[in-house]
Image: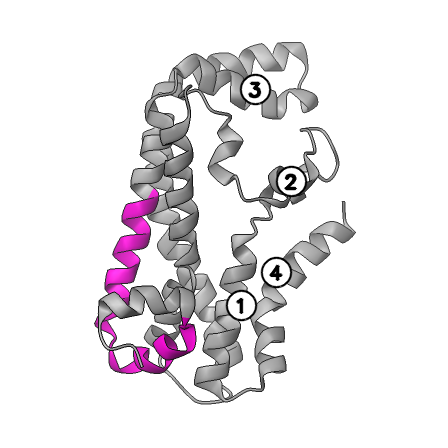
């Protein structure tokens, strides 16, 4: 059992079962975890974009889309993007602050639907599980901050913000490749998060380890499996 919030913040990485067994009695801890997730992501994204020149941001965006645009469309896009380039970091921070709680809410709905047939729990409990299961993303963002710190050039590729994808770590596909978007969107942290879903379901719903693993990884299998079929 996690004895305090400090131990809980460690247990989610090294002993998640202990944390999930404690969470129903420590509902306030989840608010702290949520604030940490939002704060680290907001600072990390702001820091990532803070040193970049607007011109670099525009050219990076154009490079990502150039394969599907005509020369005239590229110039038009460059003009539009140039008007917002200096605000790109702020927009990214605002987006993450808005979208993160929404995505966690969607995850919580899924967990409640698959988990409650075992033992009925209120939605707030499942939201707490979703929050804590996404704590690995904090490590990912801290890693991004370190990458920016050690870089000699603040104009890093925009894809660096998502540096743990299958594409960047393994495949190295270029924009325009049919599998590029699929591979660039599959972050390996998703596997850790899914594994924590499985641990949580095993603790709270009394499912077998195999069933918990299947339900924990099902969203990834469905989303990326169907996506792969239609590429």
Instruction: Give the residue number, with chain letter if any, for mark 3.
Output: 62
Horizontal and vertical percent position of residue 12: 38, 67
* Label 3 vs 2, first from the N-terminus: 3
* Label 2 vs 1, first from the N-terminus: 2
- Which is more foreground, mark 3 or mark 1? 1
- Specify whether residue 215 is painted magenta: no
Query: What's the residue at 57%, 52% (across, down)?
Result: 188
Q: Would residue 153 be found to the left or right of residue 170 on screen?
A: left
Would you say the residues marked 3 and 2 are in contact, meaning their CB atoms lie under 8 Å apart? no
Instruction: Give the residue number, with chain letter if any, for mark 4.
Output: 220
Could one spot residue 174 in this view of the protein? yes
Q: Count of labels shown? A: 4
* Label 1 vs 4, first from the N-terminus: 1
Would you say the residues marked 1 and 4 are in contact, meaning their CB atoms lie under 8 Å apart? no
Query: What's the residue at 64%, 57% (across, down)?
Result: 223
Q: Which mark is residue 195?
A: 1
* Label 4 vs 2, first from the N-terminus: 2
User: Over which residues does the magenta segment extend?
Assistant: 15-41
Label 2 Cα neighbours within 10 Å, binned few <14 / some 14-19 / many ≥20: many
């Amino acid at each position: 059992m996690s004895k305090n919030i400090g131990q809980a913040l460690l247990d989610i990485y090294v002993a998640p079962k202990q944390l999930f067994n404690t969470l129903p009695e420590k509902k306030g801890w989840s608010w702290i975890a949520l604030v940490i997730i939002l704060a680290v992501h907001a600072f990390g994204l702001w820091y990532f974009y803070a040193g970049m020149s607007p011109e670099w941001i525009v050219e990076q965006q154009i490079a990502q889309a150039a394969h599907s645009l005509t020369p005239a469309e590229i110039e038009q896009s460059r003009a539009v993007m140039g008007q917002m380039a200096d605000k790109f970091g702020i927009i990214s921070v605002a987006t993450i602050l808005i979208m993160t709680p929404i995505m966690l809410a969607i995850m919580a709905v899924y967990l409640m639907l698959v988990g409650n047939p075992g033992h009925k729990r209120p939605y707030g409990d499942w939201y707490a599980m979703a929050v804590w299961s996404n704590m690995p993303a904090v490590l990912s963002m801290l890693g991004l901050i370190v990458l920016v710190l050690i870089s000699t050039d603040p104009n890093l590729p925009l894809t660096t913000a998502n540096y743990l994808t299958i594409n960047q770590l393994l495949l190295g596909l270029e924009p325009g490749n049919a599998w590029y978007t699929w591979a660039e969107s599959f972050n390996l942290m998703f596997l850790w998060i899914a594994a924590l879903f499985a641990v949580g379901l095993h603790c709270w719903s009394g499912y077998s380890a195999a069933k918990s693993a299947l339900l924990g990884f099902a969203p990834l299998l469905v989303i990326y499996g169907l996506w792969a079929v239609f590429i």
